[in-house]
Image (cartoon, helix red, strand yellow):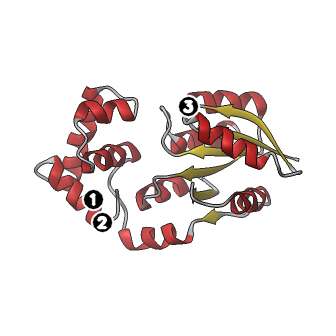
Amino acid sequence: MIRILIADDERLIRDAISGLLELEDDFEVVARAASGEEAIREALRHRPDIALLDLQMPEPDGIEVSRQLSTALPACRCIIVTSHGRPGYLKSALAVGVMGFLPKTVSAQTLAQVVRSVMDGGRHIDTDLATEAVGAGDSPLTPREADVLGLAREGAPVGEIAQRISLSPGTVRNYLASAIAKLGATNRHEAVHLASRQGWI
């Protein structure tokens, strides 16, 4: 029996994934979490074989949860399931030992196959995303800086960005300033353009 933890801040998605996986005879969902902090706590409590983690959760995000679990619970294999499959995220995820990275658009059958493959020691990376990552080069942005720039690209003001990713407005401004400096841009609009062109957001 493969013991699974599911972490996603959207209850509907969390419950849907859980329900689909529990239809498989060899899967048992032993814990669910709505935030990175809760995911770490539940993982240490239940010691799952697989942690299915949303990339963007209230802090820490899925990549940071994976990094912490790789040390605290090395037998637990982490899979990122995300609707924000940007190349920079993939590279950051691989760097911390994530064994699977796939979009939320995959079928339940594919997700089940990936869980079994990762449990057997394999690694699964979405093919389209891997191709984009190779062409994009290394991003200087942290995942949070990329998050903030991605929302800025949509035209969201600082206050809305802060609310959507559970940060304070001051922290969002700091991330924007850091991203602008790293990209050598003069303002956030230019930073968004440069990062988009490189496939980093």
Residue 195 got which mark?
1
Query: Which residue was labeled with disc 3?
Result: 35
Please rate how many residues cluster around mark 2, counting C-alpha atoms within 10 Å: few if below 14, some from 14 to 19, many from 20: some
Q: Is residue 184 visible?
A: no
Foreground residue among 25 and 194: 25
Tell me the CA gap for discs 3 and 1: 27 Å
Residue 198 got which mark?
2
Residue 168 percent location from the top left of the image: 31, 25
Q: Residue furthest left?
A: 186
Looking at the image, is mark 3 or mark 1 earlier in the sequence? 3
Image side of residue 172 versus residue 3, left or right: left
- Front position among marks 2 and 3: 3
What kind of residue is marked 3? Ser
Q: Decide: marks 2, 1 in contact (CB < 8 A)?
A: yes
Tell me the CA gap for discs 2 and 3: 30 Å
Residue 89 percent location from the top left of the image: 45, 54
Tell me the CA gap for discs 2 and 1: 5 Å
Taking the spot 55% from the left edge, 71% from the top edge, the residue there is 127
Q: Is residue 148 above or below residue 46?
A: below
Taking the spot 55% from the left edge, 31% from the top edge, the residue there is 35
Q: Is residue 23 above or below residue 162?
A: below
Which secondary structure lies at badge 1? helix
